[in-house]
Amino acid sequence: MPEPLDAGLDVCGRRLDPEGQGPVAVAFSGGGDSLALLLTAQAWARRYGRPLLALHVDHGLQTQSIAWADRAEAAAARLDVPFKRLLWIGKKPSTGLPAAAREARHGLIAEAARAVGAKVVLLGHTLDDQLENALMRGAGVPVGPLREWSPSPVWPQGRDLFHCRPLLAVRREALREWLRAEGLDWIDDPANADLRYARARARQAPQGAGAEPPLAADITRLAAACRVTPWGAIEIDRAALSAAPDAEAQRLLQIALACASGASGMARAARVGGLLDRLRSQETFIAGLAGARVIAGQDLRLVREAGEAARGGLEPVDLGSPAVWDGRWLAEGCQGLQILALAGHAAQLAPSDAAALVGIPASDRPSLPVLRDSRDRVRLARLAKPGHDDHLDGAGGCVRLLVERRFKAACGLIRCEAETMTIARMAKFHPSPYVGAEGKD
């Protein structure tokens, strides 16, 4: 067995679920790395009877892109792997094109994977990509280390979806040698040699150049001690956070701020570093950062800042199909209703709904979701009983909390595909009056 295949199968064996029901998605450009990945995925899938789906993104940036998609589809057909083309349409930016293309690619792949019930997307990154990232960071390009297993970087399209990189420890040339030995060829994108782009310049460095790729900060121990309330606030042990190394503490704060606020991106490292300094000073304070309210007492609580309007996430949304509201809640079965924040509408609640808020801190209430019907009646969405899936049952539909699932995924508490299926049972619920009498099991 070729060494690259052996290495890739080892990763697949640790990360993928042989008994999974949905397909495993493979990001397949038709290039050498992704072709080696598809061969690896096929070998693993045949062993366990798992279906595959090759997803090809046509960015429309090269005149040959349609021909490349045809070649990629033909290669997938030879391996008997279903193939789907995804098109990046619309106007392309004049600056920051690689980053925009990357975000569009991940978004298209995430939506296509979720549509077929896939939980994992395989990506063909290699050790060379990891080393190139290190060189790019040294040149001031803000790229982080790649991980063998990580959640999708796009939000909310990538919710509950993970990326796996089976070939991350393998050199690119080793993959090429394997493909040549099999008599296979692949697509070479000329953009990989275009020195206008940082990635291409990094690829011109001698093989082996660049610092050893740094390990991503391990925050699993810190994260496991955190709690997510049924209404989406994140509670953190302030003493443990203050005592943690800077890299770990700042990474946890960045993730927690994004999850509590529903933001799609992370707060700037400099601002998070300043927040950490204040937390270590034992100061008691309330502050706002990146759409979250920071409530620092003996411990730390992060909640959605209801007064933050920059992203517009708290604006009312008319629901006609399942939709993510404010990056924190998934509304399903709510056709004909409107979802909006509780702020300014508390007086319209029925007495039973108002009573359900009693156990929730006043600071946490304004950003709670409510549902409004065509007669302008407002009802509080209600949480299912502890021990059941985290759904908020509302009039005509339900609203599911996304904060805890996202937080666990981003912090590395979900380590393989099998654990994605049990994530709801991993939840830590607080006993809370915010369990409506009309909530369903």
Image (cartoon, rainbow, N blue to C red):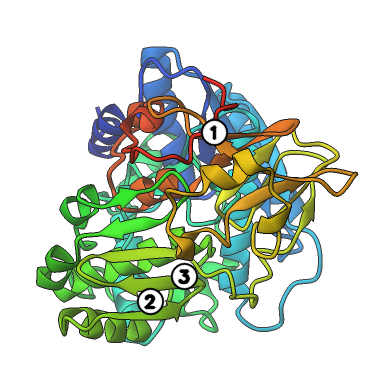
- The answer, for residue 201, to whether it is visible in the render is no
Q: Residue at x 76, y 59 (%)?
A: 316
List the residue tagged with mark 1: 436
Residue 159 locus on image (x, y percent): 52, 45
Q: CA distance from mark 3 to mark 1?
A: 26 Å
Vertical position of residue 28 compared to residue 416: above or below: below
150 or 334: which is nearer to us? Answer: 334
The disc labelled 3 sits on which kind of residue?
Ala
Horizontal side of 275 relative to 84 (left or right) equals left
List the residue tagged with mark 2: 202
The disc labelled 2 sits on which kind of residue?
Ala
Residue 173 locus on image (x, y percent): 32, 54
Looking at this view, name the residue that lies furthest to the right.
375
SS at circle 2: helix
Vertical position of residue 98 compared to residue 86: above or below: below
List the residue tagged with mark 3: 292
Q: Which mark is residue 105?
A: none
- The answer, for residue 235, to whether it is visible in the render is yes
Horizontal side of 416 relative to 388 (left or right) equals left
- Which of discs 1 and 2 lies nearer the camera? The answer is 1
Give the mark, 2 or 3, whose residue is nearer the N terminus. 2
Please say if the residues under marks 1 and 2 sit with CB atoms less than 8 Å apart.
no
- Which of discs 2 and 3 lies nearer the camera? The answer is 3
Residue 40 locus on image (x, y percent): 38, 32
Looking at this view, name the residue that lies furthest to the front.
351
Horizontal side of 244 relative to 34 (left or right) equals left
How many numbered marks are there? 3
Q: Residue at x 66, y 57 (%)?
A: 346
Horizontal side of 17 relative to 401 (left or right) equals left
SS at circle 1: loop
Crowd band around label 3 with a 10 angstrom C-alpha radius: few (<14), some (14–19), many (20+): many
